[in-house]
Amino acid sequence: KLDTLIRANGKAGGGVTRGQLFMGAAIVTGLFGLIETLIAVWK
């Protein structure tokens, strides 16, 4: 029931659901972590 509310809310708010926002944040955080690791290894 909560999921449907979030989905309906996401569609009303421009089509981006809370889940997609969290996924995007996780991907960005993961990329930054990967870049930091590569820099550390490179040095």
Image: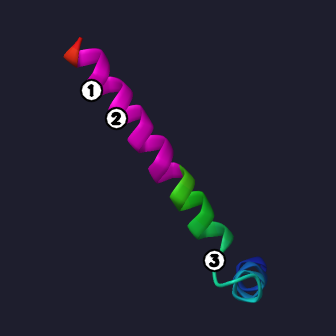
Q: Residue at x 23, y 17 (%)?
A: 41
The magenta span reads 26-41
| Spatial separation of the CA atoms under disc 1 and disc 2 | 6 Å
Q: Position of residue 15 (x, y in %)?
A: 64, 84
Q: Quadrant of residue 11?
A: bottom right
* Residue at the spot 51% in from the left edge and 50% down from the top edge: 26
Q: Of helix, strand and loop, which mostly describes the magenta segment?
A: helix
- Is 17 left, or right, of 34 in this rendering? right
Q: Which mark is residue 16?
A: 3
The x and y percentages for residue 9 are: 78, 83
Q: Amino acid at mark 1?
A: Leu
Q: CA distance from mark 3 to mark 2?
A: 26 Å
Disc 2 target residue = 34
Q: Are marks 3 and 1 in contact (CB under 8 Å)?
A: no
Q: Earlier in the sequence, mark 3 or mark 1?
A: 3
Kindly indicate whether the residue at mark 2 contacts the one at mark 1 (C-beta within 8 angstroms).
Answer: yes
Q: Is residue 40 left or right of residue 9?
A: left
Residue 8 lies in the magenta stretch = no
The one of 5 and 15 positioned closer to us in this rendering: 15
Looking at the image, residue 18 lies above or below residue 33: below
Residue 34 on the magenta span: yes
Label 3: which secondary element:
loop
- Element marked by disc 1: helix
Callout 3 amino acid: Val
User: Label 1 belongs to which residue?
Assistant: 38
